[in-house]
C-alpha cells in the first residue's frame, strides 16, 4: 500500500473541487490519511462555521458511494480525512470506516 500512496502523492496537489485541494496521502497503522486544504477559508472561519460537524454528516455517504474509496476499503478498514484552512491551521478530521458502508 505504501507504493500506492507514493504513486498517488506524485500527483498532488489535486483540486477536488473549487474549494478543496488534496495535498497528500499516507498510511498510518491500519488507515490511510488524506490531507486536504480548504483553499478559500481560514481554519478559524471553518471551525466557527461547524465545517467538521457538517463533514461528519455528509462525508460517509460520499465515501461509501465512491468506487475508488470502496476499493480502498478492501485493503484498509479506515480512511481518515484531515482538513486545514488556507492559512495552514488544522481544522479537524473525519474518520470513515468500512463498516459505515452498506
Image (cartoon, rainbow, N blue to C red):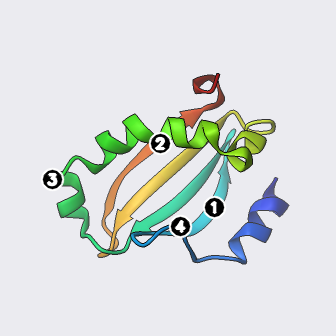
Residue 67 in percent (x, y) is at: 73, 45
Residue 51 in percent (x, y) is at: 28, 50
Q: Residue at x 19, y 62 (%)?
A: 44
Pointer 4 residue: 16
Pointer 2 residue: 59
Residue 21 in percent (x, y) is at: 49, 71
Quick check: 68 left or right of 51?
right
Element assignment for label 3: helix
Task: Indicate which disc, 1 or 4, sits on the residue closer to the N terminus.
Answer: 4
Q: Residues within 10 Å of mark 2 (few under 14, many from 20)?
A: some
Pointer 3 residue: 48
Q: Distance between the residues labelled 2 and 4?
A: 14 Å
Task: Indicate which disc, 1 or 3, sits on the residue closer to the N terminus.
Answer: 1
Q: How far apart are marks 3 and 4 (CA)?
A: 23 Å
Q: Is residue 85 or residue 58 the one in the foreground?
A: 58
Q: Is residue 19 or residue 24 the one in the foreground?
A: 19
Quick check: 39 left or right of 33?
left
Residue 37 in percent (x, y) is at: 42, 68
Task: Indicate which disc, 3 or 2, sits on the residue closer to the N terminus.
Answer: 3
Mark in front: 2 vs 1: 2
Mark in front: 1 vs 3: 3
Q: Residue at x 30, y 74 (%)?
A: 40
Mark in front: 3 vs 2: 2
Element assignment for label 1: strand
Amino acid at each position: 500500500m505504501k507504493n500506492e500512496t507514493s504513486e498517488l502523492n506524485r500527483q498532488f496537489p489535486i483540486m477536488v473541487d473549487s474549494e478543496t485541494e488534496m495535498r497528500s496521502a499516507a498510511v498510518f497503522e491500519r488507515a490511510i490519511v488524506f490531507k486536504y486544504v480548504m483553499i478559500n477559508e481560514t481554519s478559524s472561519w471553518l471551525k466557527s462555521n461547524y465545517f467538521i460537524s457538517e463533514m461528519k454528516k455528509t462525508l460517509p455517504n460520499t465515501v461509501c458511494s465512491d468506487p475508488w474509496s470502496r476499493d480502498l476499503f478492501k485493503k484498509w478498514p479506515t480512511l481518515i480525512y484531515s482538513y486545514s484552512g488556507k492559512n495552514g491551521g488544522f481544522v479537524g478530521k473525519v474518520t470513515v470506516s468500512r463498516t459505515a458502508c452498506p
